[in-house]
Each structure stands twice: as structure tokens, then as C-alpha cells.
Amino acid sequence: MIRVLIEDEQINSRSGNKDGAVWTRREQSAYIGNGHAHPARFVINLRDNEKPYPPGTYYLSPKSFVIGQYNDLNIGRYIVLDPASDKK
């Protein structure tokens, strides 16, 4: 299982305009246990009305994975986390 740590609920928003279409990206910082001495920081993309994950320990949900264009395994644009306390 891939363990993810959320330290705070802060959301960073970025927006722009590409070809006349306005876009907004909402993201939350997280840390992933990748087998190294220290967890690596990455960002989780949040949907427009999605609340940030509360601080705590989570596991990467199988719902986070998608099958790519060439039938390869990818992580989807929107990560789903399951609370660690729910895992046995």
C-alpha cells in the first residue's frame, strides 16, 4: 500500500486563459512514502467544489489508477485517498 501524509488543508489555486478558455487549478500538498529516507512532496489536484483532505495519514486508493491510451497503468488526474484508519 502506498502511504500518503497530508499536513494541512491549505489549497493553492492557479488560473489562466488558454485560447479564450479560462481555467483554474486547485491543488493541495501531500507527501508520499516512496521508500527513501524522507517522503517526497507532490500535489493532489482537487475538483472545483472538492474539500481539501484533513491532516492525517492516508493510502492511495485503487480508484486513483486508470488504464491509459495504450492499455498501460497510469495514475489519474484526480487522486483519491482512503484514510489509514479504515485499512486493516
Image: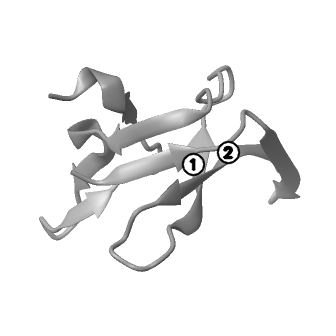
Question: Is 64 above or below relative to 56?
Answer: below
Name which quarter of the figure residue 6 lies in. top right
Query: Circle 2 — which element?
Result: strand
Residue 39 position within the rendered picture, expressed as x and y whole percent measured from the top left: 50, 67
Task: Give the alpha-carbon distance from disc 2 to disc 1, as whole Å.
Answer: 5 Å
Name which quarter of the figure residue 62 lies in. top left
Question: Is 35 above or below relative to 32?
Answer: below
Residue 7 position within the rendered picture, expressed as x and y whole percent measured from the top left: 66, 43
Residue 71 visible, this angle = yes
Name which quarter of the figure residue 9 lies in. top right
Q: Amino acid at mark 2?
A: Gln
Which residue is at 21% across, 28% downward? Answer: 87
Mark 2 in CB contact with mark 1 (< 8 angstroms): yes
Query: Circle 1 — which element?
Result: strand
- Please give the residue where the numbered disc 1 appears in the rendered image: 44
Residue 15 position within the rendered picture, expressed as x and y whole percent measured from the top left: 86, 50
Question: Is 73 above or below relative to 78?
Answer: below
For label 2, the crowd category at 10 Å Cα-Cα, with few meaning under 14, some 14 to 19 and many 20 or more, is many
- Please give the residue where the numbered disc 2 appears in the rendered image: 28
Query: Total label count?
Result: 2
